[in-house]
Amino acid sequence: MKPLFVKGPALSVRLLVLTVLSVVLMVVDARFETLKPLRSQLGLLLTPVYWLTDLPLRVWEGMSEQVASRSELIAENQQLKTEALLLQRRLQKLATLTEQNVRLRELLNSAALVDDKVIISELIGLDPSPFTQRIIIDKGSRDGVFVGQPVLDASGLMGQVVEVMPYTARVLLITDSVHSVPVQVNRNGLRAIASGSGSDYLELRHVPETSDIKEGDLLVSSGLGQRFPAGYPVARVKSVVHDAGQAFLQVQALPTAMLNRSRHLLLVFSDARTPEERASAAGLAQDRVDADHEVEPPSEPVEAQDQELEP
């Protein structure tokens, strides 16, 4: 006689099967690109979840703005006007310097200076893993975001895009232990590699003992490797330790970007042309400028010719 209730596999067997399946999926995801489309689709499905988790903060911010007093708004408005005037003055100076640099580069027959295109994105989530430092932003492949794209805030370089989904993207911060960026000391041009420590600071590795670097020096992106645009602030040197028994200095630096506080970020679209293409375009532009400035030889006055023909 067949029993009414069939006893299924034991709980321990189920747990063992699920554990083995999980390990296999993690290995496949880490070693191969098979599950990458699936992760992209899952990211698309999770976009409403990110939006819903961010909804209470949006509602709270909206309510806070509604209950702000009139005096606070007037004071804030006055402060913003003052800051806007100061920024306009700085922009005027930067515009003058930019034009001077463009003219100098044209004289040297070098690549023309082109401003980087940027779009504004907003932080909508954090990676929950304690071993990585990643954030999630609200711009994806539909907005032209691509893997390797530099990400900045108002104070400096934050990181680069490492995964793109249709409407969102993941950004690897510069303090992550697997991230490195070529930098140079703004004071003297000394080049180095700033690597993430997995904490809130960067480490400059393999800096010779005789290098001219000191506490307080500003580190900016050098542009080497053509991944990050040159000239963006990266970090400021926090400490320099000289060890007599070591051939290299122990240098730590704090990022200039507010990694734990910035909410609105900038995605930079740099000039994707190769150095040869930029040099060729600059040469063509210089040829056009030279052609425009060519002076035609003066012709003889018509009146003088008429006087010669008279008897």
Image (cartoon, rainbow, N blue to C red):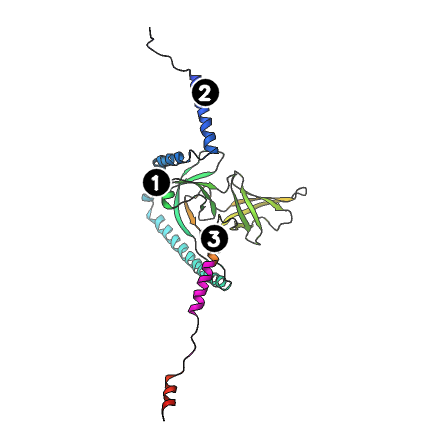
Question: Can I make out residue 248 in this image?
Answer: yes
Measure the alpha-carbon separation of dots 1 and 2.
43 Å
Give residue 51's position: percent from left, percent from top: 35, 37
Seen as rendered, the residue at the extreme right is: 245
Give residue 227's position: percent from left, percent from top: 48, 47
Q: Quadrant of residue 10?
A: top left
Please report the residue visible at 45 percent of the width from the left and 65 percent of the height from the top.
Answer: 287
Please report the residue visible at 46 percent of the width from the left and 60 percent of the height from the top.
Answer: 282
Of marks 1 and 3, the one in the foreground: 3
**Quadrant of the frame with the C terminus:** bottom left
Labels 3 and 2: the sequence-earlier one: 2
Q: Which residue is mark 2?
A: 16
Q: Are marks 1 and 2 in contact (CB under 8 Å)?
A: no
Q: Which residues are magenta?
A: 280-299
Instruction: Report the amino acid beneath label 1.
Output: Arg
Between 64 and 210, the residue placed more toward the observer is 210
Secondary structure character of the magenta stretch overall: helix
Binning the other alpha carbons within 10 Å of mark 2 as few (below 14), some (14 to 19) or many (20 upward) gives few
Residue 308 on the magenta span? no
Q: Quadrant of residue 25?
A: top left
Seen as rendered, the residue at the extreme bottom is: 311
Please report the residue visible at 40 percent of the width from the left and 34 percent of the height from the top.
Answer: 39
Seen as rendered, the residue at the extreme top is: 1
Q: Which residue is mark 3?
A: 274
Labels 1 and 3: the sequence-earlier one: 1
Q: Which residue is mark 1?
A: 58
Give residue 168's position: percent from left, percent from top: 38, 40
Of marks 3 and 2, the one in the foreground: 3
Task: Answer above or below: position of 190 versus 53.
Answer: below
Labels 1 and 2: the sequence-earlier one: 2
Instruction: Report the amino acid beneath label 2.
Output: Leu
